[in-house]
Structures are given as structure tokens and as C-alpha cells.
Amino acid sequence: MVLSMAAIVVSFMVVIIWKNMWLKPQRIRSVLQNQGIKGPKPSFLLGNLSEIKRIQSQFSNLSSSSQAEEWFHSLLPFLQHWRKQYGATFMYSTGHRQNLYVGDPKLLKELNRTRTLDLGRSTYVTNTLKPLLGGGIFRVNGSHWSFQRNLIAPQFFLSKIKNMVDFMEESTREIIRKWERIIEQSGGKTAEIVIDNEMKELTADIISKACFGGSYSLGNQIFAKITALENLLAKPSVQFGFLYLRILPTKENKEIWRLAKEIEELILKVLHRHKLQNHMSKYQNQNHTKDLLQVILENTVNDDDGSRSAWGRIWKKLMKRKSETQKMIVDNCKSIYFAGSDSTALLLTWVLIQLSLHPQWQDRLRAEIFETFPDISSHDVLDIDKLRKMKQLSMVVQESLRLYGPAIITSREALEEVKVGDMVVPKGTNILVFLTAIHRDTEIWGEDADEFKPERFEGGVSEACKYPQAYLPFGLGTRICAGQNFALIQADIALVLLLANFSFSISPNYRHSPFYRLVLFPQYGAPLLVTKL
């Protein structure tokens, strides 16, 4: 009897494995093949992972100090290899997961125009990042994503960002004073400063003030732990491992769990402070500028009189328990930190590296800065409307995002069968767009696609390339980055103030080796020679 039951269980498990690991993937591949999509032949269980590993091992980042753009060919080389072999759109497998690579600009345009909620975040990617992002806006799909976006996105409208300019400027001036001390201690007018670390410090300070206001010192602790967690999740053993291994109590997993718990505890501490502050403000009839956490809190949590915003009433239906609402707030704080700090720090780092390599553009920007803000040495808050009219600055930032955008990949999963243009995408298909490859495609950008030429954006994106829809530094479709205005204004303010006070040149210790680990960063850091003007 026991043996019979065991045989039934084993047979049942075999059927489940066969269905999920072979039959479903084959059905997806068959639908795509019938539409003319080709790709490498997968093996059972591993898919094309062995081939990916083999191709990857043939390439490595350049270790020389050369500024050549050859590093790009070692960035996800298997995608570039298959693109040459199978065309701009092809399919491949990672284990049982079926991936559709989209590099055709016309199909990208259709993908950008697709508004269905059935095209969501990749389940595998979001599960990998669950300890970091929880159930925040970057992980959830469907109605949960829609409601979270409608709650958070308005806080990043330009009208709201104008209220944040003062502390963006304040944080940047603190960095300026720090650099002045470093240069003074060096005994000259120039000192080597590792820019990427400094930009992380700057953006962490700004996002802490934006999110947590008066509790931003706790915010800096949260940022440090999120950075440590991000580094753990970026390891190949986590990125390409099997999801079920995440439940095993390995040393790596224990560290991930510990950091995730500590981050949640710190955010809850800030959350409780904000609840107390809200009650005190009402009692004392005080008005003060609200930070992001307060806005989210007020829109999701009942006040004393039982009132609730419209979105709060919707959340009440979605979130059955108070703990679920609290968890949503915590997870979105983590999401805003991850996206709002890391990406902007890298944007600033790559812009300053490019300006160091191309001093003529540094001079052009500085001239525009002093023309726009002749009294910039004073401590008046920068006028955001004037800032947005700085054409040269905008061109430089756009070109840097094209060549060295922090996000190099964006992906979507067909949660149900969807139609993208004339193509039918089966349920369960992961759609992948390699942004760096699109942004360097000579058929789209011309033969000088690998060159830093901000002047290509003089007439805007529509005149910069053959297919404007191929410029995607902040993602595509309905899930385009909600905080892009916040990131760009933050970067503009920092660049204006830094260039007004310092000049930058490449240090002999700089090694040009962009490296991908969740985001694109300088593998060996970004030491630059900073000279006080």
C-alpha cells in the first residue's frame, strides 16, 4: 500500500515536471516558430544555459586603461552573438523559461504602445529581487501595480519636485564643501576623488530627505543596508540560480534574510515616527512640507476621524489587513530607494566621466551655466524653469544616458496571451529588450553610434536617430519610470553646481571597464582629477 502511494506521488511529480519543464516551453516555442521567430535549440531542463556560459566565458571586460568602446562586446555577449545569427528578434531558453529578444525598432514601437496590464514584470526577475523590492511598485502586476502607480507617480510630477529643489541644492553644496576641504588638504588646487562613491553619497542624502524628511539620518542607514543587499542579489549564484534554492538556509541566503529584516525594521521605525508626527501636527494645528513617506501614509492609512482618501478606500479593498498596508508602504520605500538613488548616482558618474574625456563639452556647459545663472555663487535656490531650458545640459545628459544608461535591460512577461503589433506572444513568454544594444545600433543612430556626440540631440530625440522609439533610457510602455523627472532634475542641479565650482579630468588611475550587475557601473571605480575653479 505504501509503495503504491509512493509510486502515485512519484508519477504525479514526474508529470508536473514534464509539463512545466518541457510541454509548456515547447508550446511557447511552437507559437513563436510559426510566426517566423528563430533561435538556438534548447536542451531539456537547462535550455540554452550551457551555451550562454560557453559564450560568456569567451569574453571578459577589458583590463587596460584604454577608453575604447570594445567593452560593449563583452556585455551579455550571448545576446549579441545570437542577434547576428538569428536577426533582430529571436528566442532562447534559460532553463524552462522562454525568452523573446526584441531588437527590431518597429516591434519596439508596438511594444511601447501596448497598454494592457497583461504585459507585466517578469516573474523570475521579480522573484529574484523580492528581498530587495518586496511587493512594491517595481514587482507587482495587474491592479496592484495600477493602484500603486496612481498613488506614487503624482508625487514625482514637476509641480511636486519644485518643492524638493532646496534640499537637492543643499545636499550638493555639502558635497562641494567636502571636496573643497579635500583639495585644500592636498596642498594644491587639484585632488583625485573617487566620483562614483561621492555621487552615491549625494543621491542617498537627497532621496533620504525626500522620503523621510527629518528622519533622513535613519534613511542613510537604510540606504547602506539596501546597497549591501543589492550586492548580494547581484551575485551570479543568485541571478542565474534556481528559485527553489532561495529557501535553503545557506550562508548567502541567511545574510539576504538578515538584511531584508533589518531594512524593514528601520523603515517601520521611521513609519511610526511619521504617524506620531502626523498626530502631533494635527493637535498643534501645524503645517509643514510633507515628505514622500507622509504622503503615502496619509493616502493609505486611516486618520483618527476615520477619513480615508479615494485611493486609501481602494487600498482597503485590496489590503485586507493593516499589516498588508504597512508592508506595501515599507516595500515602496525600498523600491524608491533602489531606483531613486542608485540610478541617479550612476547617471551623474557617467556624465562626469564623459565630460572629463571631452573637456570641450565641459567648457560649453560651464558657459551655459554662467549665462543662465550669473549669480550662482550666491545661495539662492536654483530656478527650476531656467534649469529645464538649458539645452546644452540636456543634450549631454541625453547622450550619456544613451551610451551609459544605468539600466541596460528591460523585460516584460506575458501574464496572458497578448498581441504586440501583428505578433502573438504566448502566456509565460519573457520579452527582453537589450537597451545598450539598441542605443548603439548603427542602423538606428548612424556610423558614429559608439561616439559621445551630444550634438545629435540638438533637435530633440526625433532628429537624433532614425527611430525615436528606440531611445529608451527610462524603460518603455505603461511601466516607464515614474520618477524620471525627479532623477533628471536632481542630476541637472548637481551638474550645474559642481561644474560651476570645479573642472574635471581623467585620473591616470581610471580604468574604463563598464560592468553590469543589476545596473551598469564602473567596475574599478571612477577616480577623477577635480580642480577647484
Image (cartoon, rainbow, N blue to C red):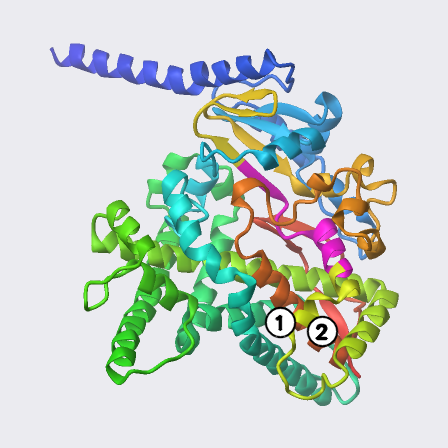
209 lies left or right of 34: left
493 lies left or right of 287: right
> What is the total number of numbered labels drawn onto the structure image?
2
* Quarter of the image where the N terminus is located: top left
According to the picture, the residue beneath numbered tag 2 turns out to be: 496
Find numbered disc 1 in the image and state the secondary structure of the residue it sits on: helix
State the CA–CA distance, disc 1 to disc 2. Answer: 16 Å
Residue 121: percent from left, percent from top: 47, 39
Are circles 1 and 2 on residues that touch, CB within 8 Å?
Answer: no
- The magenta stretch spans which residues? 395-411
Residue 89: percent from left, percent from top: 67, 25
Residue at 52 percent across and 36 percent down: it is 115
Residue in front for this viewpoint, 486 or 52: 486
Tag 2 or tag 1, which sits nearer the N-term?
1
Residue in front for this viewpoint, 17 or 396: 396
Residue at 60 percent across and 33 percent down: it is 111
445 lies left or right of 170: right
* Quarter of the image where the C terminus is located: bottom right
